Image: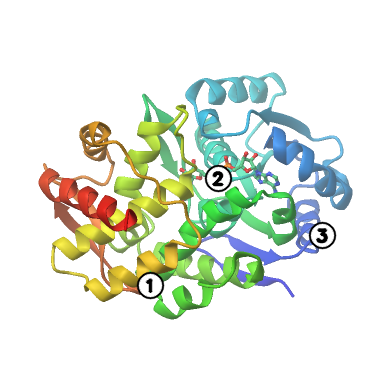
């Protein structure tokens, strides 16, 4: 049975393949005569588009825009080429963009839609675990710019989100594990019982329940603070340092997936929480024990640390000369607006490396 979750002004439907027939009814009812443009990447085009078209006959003649997979596609030049295509086909405000893909496609497609003609309707059909539990909901859209993550973006809600868990069947294990980082984040900042529940073997996980639970946690936080003036910053746990690590290694041989970088970012920010006397050593040790079976905990050469620390200062969340982080007071409880100095960050990096090497 599908789960229905109401967000601020749209609904999120989570279920198996049958969600696609609900999606079909939705667009036939709401967009009977609209042009439909599907944005997908090469992988979702191959693995997800055929079953989508099979279930949703009205998409048979949709315009399909194909992106290269990966973070490098969250780029202004790609946006420009999509806006050119939309202009060439006379796409208007009554038409519809459908984003079929992971967080790259949902972030970029949402951003493209939010800007074009001052905003056109879009629907998120997330296909990776990370996009299903996190990126497709909450209204943050964006692209990377000048080497910084999500520097250009807009808050723009989709008209609806339809989540077909069966799309995850073709996702590879590394990508599934990457998605688990945001799942752990939701538990660590808001629900200790959820952390325990997900701390099971990867392939024993009931993804429908996981996705619905994560979305409920995220949605509740977003609804209380849609524009990130306060409580929504809880969701940035692990991201201040995680984004800096992701940006620093982007495009290199050591490049990390988003969730992989965020998992490490969460551990370093848990170290910061300990340094600041907010988190107990017992909870810190438990978090490492939870993460170790799931995530590869990379070490980073000390010569890279100054650049990583410099990158954290570019984070959008910073409000003063220090680094504004969301930290933890215990497992299941985050605390926003904690200012960390470069020295504290350096110490957290040292402690992280010491702990992963024992
Ligand atoms: N907007 C937000 O609130 C928010 C939150 C978290 C993350 N993000 C963003 O999300 C992005 C990361 O998302 P991601 O991890 O989904 O990356 P991604 O979009 O690159 O997808 C990961 C890989 O999986 C492939 N893939 C996706 N679905 C598939 C399927 N069903 N079968 C086979 N292959 C499939 C993709 O082609 C890609 O190669 C980052 O850019 C991050 O900044 C945004």
Which residue has dot 2 on it? 103
Question: Residue visible at 48% across and 51% down?
Answer: 139
Q: With respect to residue 59, does 327 lie above or below? A: below
Question: Residue visible at 71% across and 41% down?
Answer: 44
Which residue has dot 3 on it? 21
Quadrant for residue 14, please give it.
bottom right
Residue 149 visible in the picture: no
- Number of numbered discs: 3
Disc marking residue 190:
1
Quadrant holding the C terminus: bottom left
Q: Quadrant of ligand 1?
A: top right
Classed neighbour count for the residue bearing mark 1: other residues with Cα under 10 Å, few (<14), some (14–19), many (≥20): many
Residue 281 visible in the picture: yes
Classed neighbour count for the residue bearing mark 2: other residues with Cα under 10 Å, few (<14), some (14–19), many (≥20): many
Question: Residue visible at 47% across and 27% down?
Answer: 251
Q: Is mark 2 within 8 Å of ligand 1?
A: yes
Q: Identify the mark nearer the N-term, 1 or 3.
A: 3
335 and 33: which one is in front?
335
Q: Residue furthest bottom?
A: 193
State left or right for residue 201 relative to residue 235: right
Mark-to-mark CA distance, 1 and 3: 33 Å
Disc marking residue 316:
none
State left or right for residue 143 relative to residue 123: left
Give the structural element (helix, strand or loop) at label 3: helix
Give the structural element (helix, strand or loop) at label 1: helix
Mark-to-mark CA distance, 3 and 2: 23 Å
């Amino acid at each position: 049975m599908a789960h229905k979750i109401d967000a601020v002004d749209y609904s999120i439907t989570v279920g198996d393949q049958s969600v696609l027939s609900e999606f079909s009814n939705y667009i036939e009812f709401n967009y009977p005569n609209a042009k439909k443009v599907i944005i997908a990447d090469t992988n979702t085009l191959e693995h997800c588009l055929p079953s989508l078209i099979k279930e949703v006959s009205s998409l048979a003649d949709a315009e399909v825009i194909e992106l290269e997979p990966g973070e490098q596609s969250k780029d202004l030049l790609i946006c420009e080429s999509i806006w050119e295509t939309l202009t060439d086909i006379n796409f208007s405000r009554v038409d519809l963009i459908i984003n079929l893909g992971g967080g790259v496609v949902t972030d970029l497609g949402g951003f493209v839609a939010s800007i074009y003609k001052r905003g056109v309707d879009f629907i998120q059909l997330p296909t990776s675990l990370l996009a299903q539990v996190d990126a497709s909901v909450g209204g943050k859209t964006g692209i990377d710019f000048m080497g910084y993550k999500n520097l250009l973006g807009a808050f723009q809600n989709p008209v609806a989100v339809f989540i077909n868990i069966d799309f995850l069947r073709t996702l590879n294990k590394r990508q599934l594990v990457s998605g688990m980082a945001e799942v752990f984040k939701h538990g660590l900042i808001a629900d200790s019982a959820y952390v325990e529940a997900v701390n099971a073997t990867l392939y024993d996980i009931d993804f429908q329940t996981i996705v619905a639970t994560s979305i409920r946690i995220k949605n509740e936080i977003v609804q209380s603070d849609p524009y990130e003036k306060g409580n929504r910053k809880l969701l940035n746990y692990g991201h201040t340092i995680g984004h800096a690590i992701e940006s620093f290694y982007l495009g290199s041989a050591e490049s990390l997936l988003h969730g992989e970088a965020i998992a490490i970012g969460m551990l370093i920010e848990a170290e910061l929480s300990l340094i600041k006397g907010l988190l107990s050593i017992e909870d810190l040790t438990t978090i490492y024990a939870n993460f170790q079976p799931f995530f590869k905990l990379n070490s980073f050469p000390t010569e890279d640390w100054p650049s990583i620390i410099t990158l954290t200062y570019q984070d959008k969340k910073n409000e003063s000369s220090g680094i504004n982080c969301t930290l933890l007071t215990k497992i299941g409880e985050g605390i926003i607006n904690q200012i960390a100095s470069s020295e504290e960050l350096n110490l957290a990096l040292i402690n992280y490396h010491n702990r992963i090497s024992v």
